[in-house]
Image: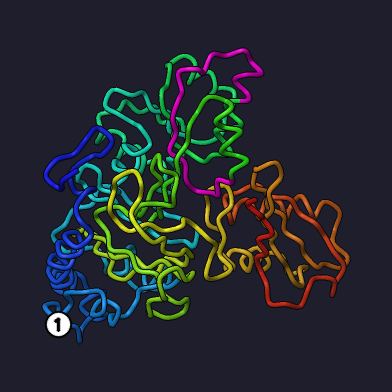
Amino acid sequence: MSAQDTGPDHLDALETRSPEQREQDLFAALPGLIAHAKAQTDFFATHLKDVDPAQVTDRAALAKLPVLRKSALKEVQALTPPFGGLVARGRSVGRIFQSPGPINEPQGLGANYWRAARALYAAGFRAGDVVHNSFSYHFTPGGWILDDGARALGCLVFPAGIGQTEQQAQAIAAMRSVGYCGTPSFLRIVLEKAKELGLDTSSMKKGLVSGEALPPSLRALIRDLGVDVYQAYATADLGVVAYETPALEGMVVEEGVIVEIVRPGTGDPVEPGEVGEIVVTTFTPEYPLIRFATGDMTALLPGISPCGRTNMRIKGWMGRADQTTKIKGMFVHPEQVAEVVKRHPEIRRARLVASSVDNVDQMLIRVEVAGAAEGFDQILQRTLQDVTKLKGQVELVEPGSLPNDGKVIDDIRTYA
């Protein structure tokens, strides 16, 4: 297939450009993005003050620029609220979100701002489909990212949000929803609830899932319930970065970003195939993120996808470069564990454990405490939910019993 035409399996001809043409196009546009960011944002005026945009015309030159770490956004935004001087002057944003950290994220006014349409199209979503979106619409941008992309394709979106399993199953049956957006574990729970209630959800055939790992066992369970699901790798700051296709060989990078894989803690690119941290440059003039270090780990896959899309591929999410982890689609930071401890002077040390039971994420906080008052575990459970926005269990342990290994968050999940 040439770069001038496209078939029904591709959203547009950008997906089938030669790799050489894509690289040329991206790096022809990059100097303009950098010049815009320096001229129109206070942050990049300082961050890139010694950079000549005209000289950044290939990956080697881009790799010399400093990275902006996601972990630094909280401090940057606290100094210059709400966005740390990263939103361009003269550019309008329509919404402001807040993710755990807390970190604030803007949404521009243009259609498909988060670039989710391409991932949805690859998963089989088409104009006219009724889409059941069970990502959260509250505080964080997850629900809005997929809502925005689905409506850009011409889909009809039901903003289900999270929770209310029985009502969600009833809504799918009543509306004859064709597609699902949300976490894979919740899709399984809703479909099993529908089966238990005798509801007909056979209209639902496809899903785009994100926010948590999709082990083969869970994908197979969901397929047995009638739905083929594909993954998208997205962040609240960047939107969609990469997505699965029917080839199911890694994730194809979205056409509107430049992805680098670097050695954690540096900005230095790793060798092809080596695991490293995902660094993204995104062409969003409202919020131009340049060399944004996500803290997520992946590796490059060689070659071109059998689906015909010619962009670079990554293996998908392979863990975190720091102790931050994602539980039920929400990031949990070491600073949040520290905040829980701060609110209860009885606690000497704490360790949050992320696990999985039957492909459903679990969260437990173990705390060293002596002489706690009766009911302290219930009080601490409420504090944990207040700080992390997630429900978790509490285990009180004897002082000195937690491992002395520096871990605040221990992710013991496996994805066989």
Q: Where residue 416 appears, x then y in whole percent?
A: 65, 50
Q: Residue at x 45, y 25 (%)?
A: 205
| Horizontal arrangement in the rendering, residue 144 relative to residue 217 (left or right) | left
| Horizontal arrangement in the rendering, residue 119 relative to residue 173 (left or right) | left
Q: Residue at x 36, y 23 (%)?
A: 130
Q: How is the image coloured?
A: rainbow
303 or 115: nearer the viewer: 303
Q: Residue at x 59, y 46 (%)?
A: 215
* Number of marks: 1
Q: Where residue 395 appears, x then y in whole percent?
A: 80, 57
Q: Quadrant of residue 284?
A: bottom left
Q: Residue at x 57, y 50 (%)?
A: 389
Q: Where residue 60 appears, x then y in whole percent?
A: 26, 79
The N terminus lies in which quarter of the figure? top left
**Label 1 Cα neighbours within 10 Å, binned few <14 / some 14-19 / many ≥20:** few
Q: Where residue 387 appears, x then y in whole percent?
A: 59, 56
Q: Quadrant of residue 181?
A: top left
Which residues, given as a range, are shown in magenta? 192-215
| Horizontal arrangement in the rendering, residue 356 relative to residue 113 (left or right) | right
Name the residue tied to disc 1.
52
382 or 101: nearer the viewer: 101
Q: Quadrant of residue 413?
A: bottom right
Q: Is residue 120 magenta?
A: no
SS class, disc 1: loop
- Amino acid found under the numbered disc labelled 1: Asp
137 or 116: nearer the viewer: 116
Q: Is residue 211 magenta?
A: yes
